[in-house]
Image (cartoon, grey):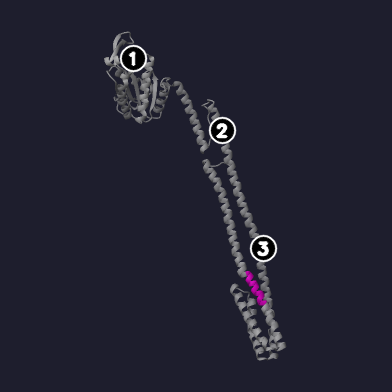
C-alpha cells in the first residue's frame, strides 16, 4: 500500500483519523439502529401490546355480559341488571380506547359491534321491566351477534399476535444485523489503520536504516556517500540534508586543505570556485583585493614572526569589519603572504569596507615599528633588486572590481583586473583604495 506524499506526522494522523472515522461510522450506525428499535419498541408497547390486551379484555367483557344476562333471566334477579349496565359501559370504554389506538379496525369487527349495540339495549330494557320471557327470546336472538363479535375479536387477536411475533423476530434479526455491521466496521477500521501503521513503521525502519548506514559512511570519511531515500516526508528531507551535508563536508575538507595555515582563511581554490559559482548563477559581486605596501621590507627588518603578526592583525581587522557592516554574501580569503581577497554582494558596502579598513590599518600600523622607526617615519634598507633605499611605514592598498562591469567575467579576468589596479595603487603614496568605475552597468 503506497501512501501519498505526506509527512510522517500527517501519515500518523491519517491512520488515526481513519480509525476514528470507522469507529464513528460504526457508532452512528449502531445509534441509528438503536433509535429505530426504540421507536419500534414504543410502537410495540403503546399500540400493538395495548391493542392486543384491549381486544382480549373486550372479548372477556362480551363473554361476561352474555353469561351475566342469562343468569339474570334464569334467577330473575333484578339486582344483577346494574352489573349488566356496568359491563356495557366497560365495553364502550374498551371499544373507544381500541378505536383510538387502531383507527382502521377490521370492517367485519366494526359491523359486528354495530349490530350488537343495536340489540343489547332492547334486551337490557326487557330485563329492567322484568319481562323475563321476552328477555329470554331477545337474548336468544342476539346470540348470533355475540358469536360473530367473539369470532371477529378472536381473528383480530390472532392477527395482532402474528404482527407482534413478527415484530419481535424483526427486533432479534435487526439487533443481530446491527451488531454484526458495527463489529465489521470496527474491525475494518482497525485493519486499515493497522495496514497504514505497518506501512509507516516499515517505511520509518527502512529510512532509519539507510540514514544510519549513511551516518557511519560519512563518519568514516566517505563524504561522497549518497543517501537514497526517495520520500517526501521528514526522512526524505533529512536524506537530502545528509547529502547536502556530505557535499558541504567534502567542500570543507577541500577548503581546509586550501586554507592558509596562518589565518585559517580559505585560499585561492575556494575563492575561484565561489567566483565561478556566482558568475554561473548570475549573482554579481565585488572582488576586493587587499595588499600591504612595503611589507617585504618590514619582514626583512623585523623578521618573519613579526611579519606573521602583522598579517594576523590584518586578518582580524577584516574578520571584524565584514560582519559588523553586514556585507551580504561575504567570503574572506587569504591567497598568500600579505594578500587578501574578499567577495561581497554589495558594491556600496564594499566601498564602505575599503574606507574603514584603510582607516583602521593606518591607525595601528605604527604599532608594528620601533620607537626610532616611528619617529623617523620609516627606515633605510635594500629593496628586492639589491638597491639601497628609504622605506616608509607600511600602508595598505585595496582594489575593488564589480563583476558586472566586466564583459564575459571569469575568475582569472577579475583577478587580473584587480592586480593591475593594485599595482597602480602601490605606486601612490599612503594607503589608498580604488573602485573600478570605468564601465557603466
Q: State the SS at label 1.
A: helix
Q: How far across and down, in percent of the image, does residue 372 sit?
A: 29, 14
- Is 42 above or below relative to 135? above
Q: Are marks 1 and 2 in contact (CB under 8 Å)?
A: no
Q: Which residue is mark 3?
A: 169
Disc 1 packing (10 Å; few <14; some 14–19; many ≥20): many
Residue closer to the observer: 59 or 143: 59
Q: Nearer the viewer, residue 249 or 103?
A: 249
Tell me which residue sits at (64%, 62%) in the image.
171
The N terminus: image quadrant: top right
Q: Identify the magenta region.
A: 48-59
- The Cα–Cα distance between marks 1 and 3, rounded to whole angstroms, is 113 Å
Magenta segment, principal secondary structure?
helix
- Where residue 42 appears, as percent x and y from the top left, is 60, 66
Q: Which label is found at residue 311?
A: none
Q: Is residue 395 left or right of residue 84?
A: left
First-in-chain label (3 vs 2): 3
Foreground disc of the pair 1, 3: 1
Q: Position of residue 40 (x, y in %)?
A: 60, 64
Residue, disc 1: 298
Rendering quarter of residue 295:
top left
Earlier sequence position, callout 1 versus callout 2: 2
Hey, which quadrant is residue 401 in on the image? top left
Would you place residue 375 above or below residue 407 in this image? above
Task: For mark 3, give the secondary structure.
Answer: helix
Amino acid at each position: 500500500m503506497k501512501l501519498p506524499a505526506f509527512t510522517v506526522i500527517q501519515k500518523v494522523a491519517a491512520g488515526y483519523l481513519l480509525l476514528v472515522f470507522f469507529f464513528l461510522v460504526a457508532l452512528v450506525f449502531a445509534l441509528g439502529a438503536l433509535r429505530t428499535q426504540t421507536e419500534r419498541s414504543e410502537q410495540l408497547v403503546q399500540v400493538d401490546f395495548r391493542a392486543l390486551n384491549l381486544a382480549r379484555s373486550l372479548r372477556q367483557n362480551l363473554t361476561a355480559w352474555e353469561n351475566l344476562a342469562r343468569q339474570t333471566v334464569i334467577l330473575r334477579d333484578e339486582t344483577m341488571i346494574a352489573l349488566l349496565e356496568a359491563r356495557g359501559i366497560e365495553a364502550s370504554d374498551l371499544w373507544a380506547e381500541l378505536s383510538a389506538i387502531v383507527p382502521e379496525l377490521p370492517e367485519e369487527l366494526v359491523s359486528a359491534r354495530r349490530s350488537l349495540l343495536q340489540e343489547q339495549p332492547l334486551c337490557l330494557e326487557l330485563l329492567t321491566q322484568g319481562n323475563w320471557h321476552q328477555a329470554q327470546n331477545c337474548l336468544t336472538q342476539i346470540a348470533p351477534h355475540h358469536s360473530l363479535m367473539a369470532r371477529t375479536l378472536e381473528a383480530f387477536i390472532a392477527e395482532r399476535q402474528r404482527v407482534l411475533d413478527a415484530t419481535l423476530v424483526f427486533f432479534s434479526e435487526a439487533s443481530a444485523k446491527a451488531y454484526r455491521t458495527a463489529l465489521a466496521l470496527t474491525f475494518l477500521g482497525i485493519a486499515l489503520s493497522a495496514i497504514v501503521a505497518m506501512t509507516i513503521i516499515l517505511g520509518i525502519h527502512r529510512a532509519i536504516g539507510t540514514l544510519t548506514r549513511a551516518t557511519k559512511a560519512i563518519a568514516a570519511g566517505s563524504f561522497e556517500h549518497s543517501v537514497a531515500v526517495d520520500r517526501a516526508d521528514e526522512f526524505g528531507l533529512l536524506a537530502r540534508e545528509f547529502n547536502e551535508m556530505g557535499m558541504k563536508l567534502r567542500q570543507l575538507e577541500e577548503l581546509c586543505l586550501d586554507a592558509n595555515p596562518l589565518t585559517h582563511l580559505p585560499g585561492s581554490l575556494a575563492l575561484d570556485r565561489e567566483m565561478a559559482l556566482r558568475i554561473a548563477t548570475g549573482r554579481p559581486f565585488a572582488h576586493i583585493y587587499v595588499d600591504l605596501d612595503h611589507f617585504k621590507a618590514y619582514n626583512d627588518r623585523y623578521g618573519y614572526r613579526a611579519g606573521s603578526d602583522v598579517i594576523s592583525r590584518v586578518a582580524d581587522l577584516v574578520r571584524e569589519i565584514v560582519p559588523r557592516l553586514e556585507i551580504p554574501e561575504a567570503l574572506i580569503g587569504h591567497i598568500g603572504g600579505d594578500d587578501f581577497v574578499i567577495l561581497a554582494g554589495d558594491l556600496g558596502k564594499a566601498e564602505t569596507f575599503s574606507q574603514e579598513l584603510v582607516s583602521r590599518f593606518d591607525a595601528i600600523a605604527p604599532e608594528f615599528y620601533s620607537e626610532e622607526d616611528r619617529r623617523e617615519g620609516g627606515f633605510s634598507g635594500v629593496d628586492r633588486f639589491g638597491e639601497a633605499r628609504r622605506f616608509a611605514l607600511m600602508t595598505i592598498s585595496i582594489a575593488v572590481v564589480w563583476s558586472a562591469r566586466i564583459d564575459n567575467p571569469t575568475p582569472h579576468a577579475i583577478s587580473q583586473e584587480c592586480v593591475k589596479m593594485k599595482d597602480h595603487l602601490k605606486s601612490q603614496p599612503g594607503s589608498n583604495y580604488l573602485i573600478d568605475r570605468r564601465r557603466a552597468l
